[in-house]
Image (cartoon, rainbow, N blue to C red):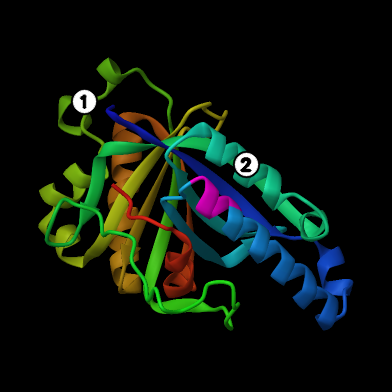
Amino acid sequence: MTYDEKSVVVLLKGGRLPSWYNLCEDVQASHSQLHVELMLSVAQEHKMMRLEGYRLISPMEYWERFWVIEFPSLSGAEAWIQAERAPPYGRYGYYEYHLARRSALQTYRAGSGEPDQVSGERDIDPHRIPELGVDRDVIVVLNFQRNRAKTEDAPASTSDYSEDSLCRSDTALSNSILAAESFELIAPQDNWDTVSIVELSQFTDVETWLDRKIELSRATNRGSSAYLCRKWSPEYFKLWAPRSTP
């Protein structure tokens, strides 16, 4: 697999602890504003390249959201993690961090092979927190997987497991997928070492995608688990990145 070593990606499984909901609304608002100010300062200082969030349709206990946070260096990733857990806001969060690299050959966009550039309405002040919500026009599949067999053990027809290759080799999928990308963990976990993020517009397309992934998982002896999400306030969080993702 080929990696993009121009950046470091923080993958976060996050949520809020029950203690957060015991706070009154004014205290929640105050803590949230302080948190946003701190995180925006880290984003600017370390030239954050991307911040994108997804909300699970069905939360897994304290895990409610998945975040992709990208920096040009490890120092930015470290600063982000430290700031995110800082009190007072940080006391009320659930955090599971993983450092990863973007899989350079595993990015697909409908109509092209290039990812969209991070964009947003720059005249909107990201320091002012809007009402946050999900984008209901897109369904996102998070697919966590781990290769449990050596590459040479996989059939030749399935040796190329990239999202890009899968999309381009299956006409039905390529017509229904809005975007797909993969990230490879720097430190593999016991049950996953790669996560793919796939955007689709229809639930029937999600079923088709999952059927195809299950078929490939069996053929390549890969374990996998999938979660359905919605993009979390994408237009707002695009404003956080001071420059475009390469």
Q: Is residue 165 above or below residue 22?
A: above
Q: Which region shows up in magenta?
A: 42-46
Query: Residue sitting at 25 percent across and 64 percent down?
Result: 178
Q: Is residue 225 visible?
A: no
Disc sitting over residue 155 in the figure: 1
Residue 97 spot, x, y in % from top left: 61, 41
Q: Is residue 154 left or right of residue 185?
A: left
Residue situated in front as seen by the camera: 202 or 178 = 178
Give the quarter of the image for residue 26. Answer: bottom right
Residue 225 spot, x, y in % from top left: 48, 47
Residue 235 spot, x, y in % from top left: 42, 74
Q: Is residue 19 above or below residue 76?
A: below
Give the quarter of the image for residue 184. Answer: top left
Q: Amino acid at mark 1?
A: Pro
Q: Is residue 172 above or below residue 9?
A: below
Say if the magenta span includes residue 45.
yes
Q: CA distance from mark 1 to mark 2?
A: 43 Å
Give the quarter of the image for residue 243. Answer: bottom left
Disc sitting over residue 79 in the figure: 2
Query: Residue sitting at 16 percent across and 51 percent down?
Result: 113
* Neighbours of disc 2 within 10 Å: few (<14), some (14-19), many (20+): some
